[in-house]
Amino acid sequence: MQRRNAYLTRARISETRFRDFLRCFALDLTATQAAELTGVHRNTANALYRRIRVRLAEACEAESPLSGEVELDESYFGPRRVPGRHGRGAGKKIIVFGLLKRHGKVYTQVVPNVRRKTLQDIIQGRVELTSTLYTDTYISYHGLVDVGYAKHYRVQHDKNEFARGSSHINGIESFWSFAKRRLQKFNGVAPHLFSLHLKECEWRFNHRDQDLYRELLKLLRAIPL
């Protein structure tokens, strides 16, 4: 009789093999590499990677609101340059908004645009009013103190200012660099899967000082796939 897999419901994979497979995911190997190393069928490996990313996205969404010193910024993922298209989110780029608690966790969300209402609805839903906010001077960040935030400092990137004492958004910009470097190995991510890959980057960053394999075991033991 096949041993029950505590991490995978209706499993056709033994718990031992699945643990080996999960270790490959923790090491940031591709699904193809994980399949080759563990003997799991490639289609099964791709399906499991997607299910794991869904669980990671759910865990990220369940995190508590950010507080303290919080950096805010938007970023754009996709083709480096599209001829004839200029400006924020030009061409086929995917727009992402991010919040980062200094020396803490990041939260990201794919957004349809960078209008004030779009970004400030996320801010007010994810950042406590007692927080000190740091942004660039983009117009969508205007009025945050008026809606109740304690303090709001801005760095003037348009004037080649990248830091003024504690006023900077270097932390969230470092996360964007990390995410873009990591996603390059996939040689392009399908738009309908991008948000899951982004959330995986978020989860990996937020647990950067922890044993990712152990964290995955804990998460999937509590809520099996």
Image (cartoon, helix red, strand yellow):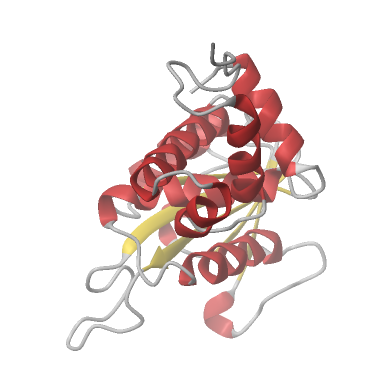
Residue 146 location (% of width, % of height): 53, 38
Quadrant of the rendered structure where residue 68 is?
A: top right
Residues 100 and 37: in front is: 37
Q: Quadrant of the N terminus?
A: top right
Residue 164 location (% of width, % of height): 76, 71
Instruction: Look at 70% across and 24% down and name the residue there.
Output: 218
- Asked if residue 188 lies left or right of residue 64, the reply is left
| Figure check: 5 above or below 32 | above
Residue 185 location (% of width, % of height): 49, 70
Instruction: Look at 35% across and 61% down and name the residue there.
Output: 189
Q: Is residue 67 visible?
A: no
Q: Is residue 40 visible?
A: yes
Instruction: Look at 62% across and 29% down and name the residue there.
Output: 65
| Figure check: 224 above or below 118 | above
Residues 52 and 46: in front is: 46
| Figure check: 41 above or below 4 | below
Residues 202 and 71: in front is: 202
Q: Residue furthest bottom?
A: 83
Query: Number of marks in the image?
Result: 0
Residue 135 location (% of width, % of height): 59, 58
Instruction: Look at 72% across and 40% down and name the residue there.
Output: 213
Q: Residue furthest front?
A: 1
Q: Residue furthest left?
A: 84
| Figure check: 224 above or below 81 | above
- Asked if residue 174 lies left or right of residue 115, the reply is right
